[in-house]
Image (cartoon, rainbow, N blue to C red):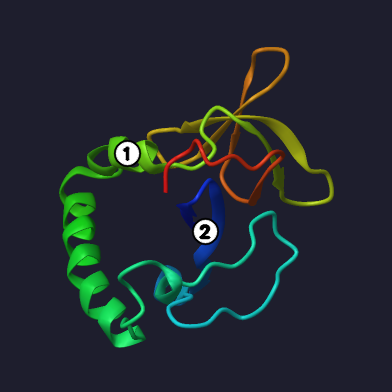
Amino acid sequence: DILLVRDGAAGKLAGILLESGEDASGTHVIAGIGANVRVHPGATDGVFPPAVLAECPGAHHLYPLDVVEAFAPAFAARRAVWARQGLGGLKADWLARAYGLGQPAMVRYGATPVTGRFDGIDDDGTLLLAQEDGTIRRLAAGEVVFAKPSATGGV
C-alpha cells in the first residue's frame, strides 16, 4: 500500500496488487495500481482509513489523468534503475520511505499470521520480520498489518 501521512495520521492513498502465473511462454507477473485521486472506494477492514489525494492542500485540482501523467515518467525512471542495478539500486530509497520500519507488525499469509518487528527488506525484496528470539523470518508474500499505527514512519 501507499500511505499518505499528514497531520499525525496515515491513510491508504493507493494499493498495488501483484498476480503471477505460468503459461506455455513462461512465468509472468501482472501489477495493478489503484489510487484514490478524487474519491475512495469506502472504508476497508485494514488498519489505515482511506485517504484522497485531492483533499490535500494544493491538490484539489488534480484528476486521474494528471496523476497518470506524473506517475508514468517517474515509474519509467525507477524501472530503468531496476533494470540496470536490480533492487539494490532502489532499496535505500524504498527503506527511507518505508512506513513502520522498526515497528511491530503482523503478516497475514496462510492460516497462521506471523508477528514480529518490521526490519526491512532483503536484497531480493523479501520482507524481514525480527522474531522475539532474535531470529529473522523472511517472508516473500503476505499482507503486512501494523500492530500500532504511528506517523513516525515515511510515506
Report the front residue among 15 and 125: 15
Furthest toward the top, the residue is 133
| Above-or-below relation of 143 to 33 | above
Check if mark 2's residue and mark 1's residue have beta carbons within 8 Å.
no
Checking the image for residue 118, the label placed there is none
At which x and y percent is residue 136? 60, 22
**Residue found 83% across the figure and 44% down from its top:** 112
Q: Which mark is residue 1?
A: 2
| Secondary structure state at the residue bearing disc 2 | loop
Crowding around mark 1 (Cα neighbors within 10 Å: few <14, some 14 to 19, many 20+) is some
**Residue 128 occupies which quadrant of the picture?**
top right
Q: Residue at x 27, y 43 (%)?
A: 90
Residue ID at (27%, 37%): 88
Across and down, in percent, residue 17 comes to 52, 67
Q: Disc 1 marks which residue?
A: 91
- Choose between 43 and 98: the one closer to the eye: 43
